[in-house]
């Protein structure tokens, strides 16, 4: 089973589309590492029986918890690559804010460039989501185009709807990230099959409702069914932020399992990619919520 993002799906830390974090039950006819003679096998509930990298680790003659000597992913790898990805996004966002003015004379051109960058970023994200291996160049290019879009949209909201909205959205996103991380490490959030299924069902329903609202807005004019404005818009904005927080928990679980199961070091780029997608989702929901609240004043 794979961890998924509110916007795009991506491969988890496993082979053959398996997600190590939830593959805890032994299966009949499983891999050879779970059979007799495996030094890590246990009679029941073998934690390595469903480890997608166990066979690789046996080649080194060591358990998968030895990333430093076997080229395996570590938390430091994830932090470094996430910082790099977010750094590219922030720099391009700042440049687009400064170089693409949103005054009356230039807003149409700047907004058009921003939407074009968003579409390119979406295509790049989909391509990476379906690739078998992480492509650092592809992920960083996605971050660059996404940054252009965020810079333009943030500038428009900040200068035309709510002064200081961008900083408020950044602070809100950081607060959600810190809060979910603390709750996850403290064990207040338990990421299991039930949690995964609930989040995926809720996210699917949320996205479908937004798509229906968009269709009504395109063909009927206005705000469609009203999911993006007024009191109902505020409710859906809060729901969107909560869903983003849930996906952060799934991301943390994915990273934790990737380190524990000895995922290759290059897959830290997948963690950076997934975390960036989730943080962008949360930021945009905060920005939209702030816009609605200020529009209602």
Image (cartoon, rainbow, N blue to C red):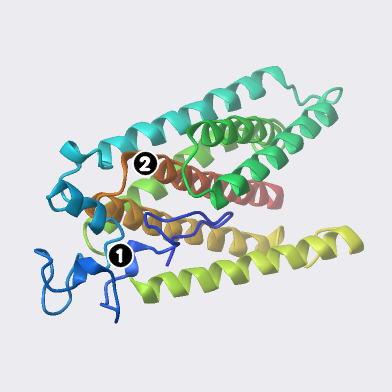
Q: Residue at point 56% right, 66% down?
A: 203
User: Relative to 204, is 194 on the left or the right?
Assistant: left
- Quick check: 243 above or below 68? below
Q: Earlier in the sequence, mark 2 or mark 1?
A: 1
Q: How many numbered circles are shown? A: 2
Q: Which residue is mark 1?
A: 189
Residue 236 pos. (x, y %) = 61, 63
Tell me where residue 55 sits by quadrant.
bottom left
- Quick check: 59 above or below 195? above
Tag in front: 2 or 1: 2
Label 1 element class: loop
User: Relative to 147, is 66 on the left or the right?
Assistant: left
Residue 202 pos. (x, y %) = 54, 71
- In the rendered image, the quadrant that contains the N terminus is bottom left
- Quick check: 12 above or below 104? below
User: In the rendering, which numbered label is found on residue 203?
Assistant: none
User: In the rendering, which numbered label is found on residue 268?
Assistant: 2
């Amino acid at each position: 089973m794979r961890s998924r993002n509110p916007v795009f799906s991506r491969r988890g830390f496993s082979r053959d589309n398996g997600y190590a974090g939830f593959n805890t039950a032994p299966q009949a006819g499983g891999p050879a590492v779970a059979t007799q003679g495996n030094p890590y096998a246990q009679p029941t509930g073998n934690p390595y029986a469903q480890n997608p990298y166990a066979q690789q680790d046996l080649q080194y003659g060591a358990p998968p918890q030895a990333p430093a000597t076997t080229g395996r992913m570590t938390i430091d790898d994830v932090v470094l690559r996430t910082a790099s990805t977010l750094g590219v996004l922030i720099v391009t966002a700042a440049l687009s804010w400064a170089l693409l003015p949103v005054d009356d004379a230039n807003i149409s051109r700047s907004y058009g460039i921003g939407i074009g960058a968003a579409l390119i970023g979406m295509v790049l994200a989909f391509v990476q989501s379906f690739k078998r291996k992480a492509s650092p160049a592809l992920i960083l290019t996605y971050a660059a185009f996404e940054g252009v879009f965020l810079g333009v949209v943030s500038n428009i909201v900040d200068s035309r709807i709510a002064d200081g909205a961008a900083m408020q959205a950044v602070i809100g996103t950081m607060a959600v990230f810190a809060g979910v991380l603390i709750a996850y490490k403290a064990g207040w959030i338990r990421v299991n099959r039930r949690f995964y299924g609930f989040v995926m069902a809720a996210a699917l329903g949320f996205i479908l409702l937004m798509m229906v609202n968009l269709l009504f807005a395109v063909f009927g004019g206005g705000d469609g069914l009203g999911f993006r404005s007024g009191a109902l818009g505020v409710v859906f904005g809060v729901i969107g932020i909560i869903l983003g927080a849930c996906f952060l928990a799934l991301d943390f679980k994915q990273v934790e399992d990737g380190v524990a199961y000895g995922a290759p070091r290059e897959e830290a780029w997948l963690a950076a990619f997934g975390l960036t997608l989730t943080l962008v989702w949360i930021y945009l929901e905060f920005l939209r919520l702030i816009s609605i609240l200020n529009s209602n004043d």
